[in-house]
Amino acid sequence: MKITDILLAEHFVFHNLFDSIEAGAGRLRTVAAVRAQAALLESMLKPHSQMEHELLMDPLDHCLDQLGHRDTFHHEHEAIEHALAAARKARDLVSARRLLLEAVLASRKHFDKEERVVFPLAERLLKSKTLLELGARWMQQRQGTAR
């Protein structure tokens, strides 16, 4: 399976998670509950982001730089990480919810940009064999972390 197909499938799962977090945020009654949601999202986004960067963004780095998107993608990742870390440290419920939902919205926008810019770019510039090899590396690395 191509790396782009794998990452798109992961994005689909994340979009469902984002829907669930957004729908349930108003029902979270304690800061601890919001912190738990933020920690869950953070723990899921981190390996996705690392794999995406290592296997797809790094090979396309020079192209993204020429298109003016390289720094934007890095800043967006940092903003998402910052919002989730702040949500995990928030002391009041309103701030914690706001920060969690801010991270979800930023993630949605970032994923949308990857789906519109990065994945099509990878499909155009990388050989099908390369995309399949990167997909195989993703599978190997995921299997190594699942144990």
Image (cartoon, rainbow, N blue to C red):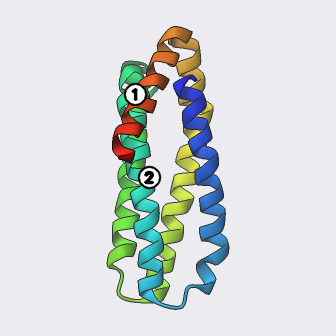
Q: Decide which of 59, 129 is in the foreground and name it.
A: 129
Describe residue 115's horizontal placement relative to residue 127 as left or right. Answer: right
Describe residue 93's horizontal placement relative to residue 6 as left or right. Answer: left
Q: Residue placed at 54% from the left, 69% from the top?
A: 101
Where is residue 92 drawn, in percent x and y? Answer: 41, 89
Where is residue 51 drawn, in percent x and y? Answer: 39, 37
Visible residue check, residue 24: yes
Visible residue check, residue 57: no
Quarter assignment of residue 7: top right
Query: Which residue is labeled 2 in the image?
Result: 45
Describe residue 120's horizontal placement relative to residue 131 as left or right. Answer: right
Task: Identify the mark nearer the N-term, 1 or 2.
Answer: 2
Rendered view: 94 above or below 66: below
Q: Residue placed at 66% from the left, 63% from the top?
A: 19
Which amino acid lies under the numbered mark 1 shown in the image of this protein? Leu
Please rate how many residues cluster around mark 2, counting C-alpha atoms within 10 Å: few if below 14, some from 14 to 19, many from 20.
some
Query: Which residue is labeled 1 in the image?
Result: 55
Rendered view: 54 above or below 108: above
Where is residue 14 drawn, in percent x and y? Answer: 58, 52
Quarter assignment of residue 128: top right
Whether the residues at callouts 1 and 2 have beta carbons within 8 Å, the answer is no
Where is residue 147 drawn, in percent x and y? Answer: 35, 46
The secondary element bearing badge 1 is classed as helix
Q: Residue placed at 67% from the left, 73% from the top?
A: 23
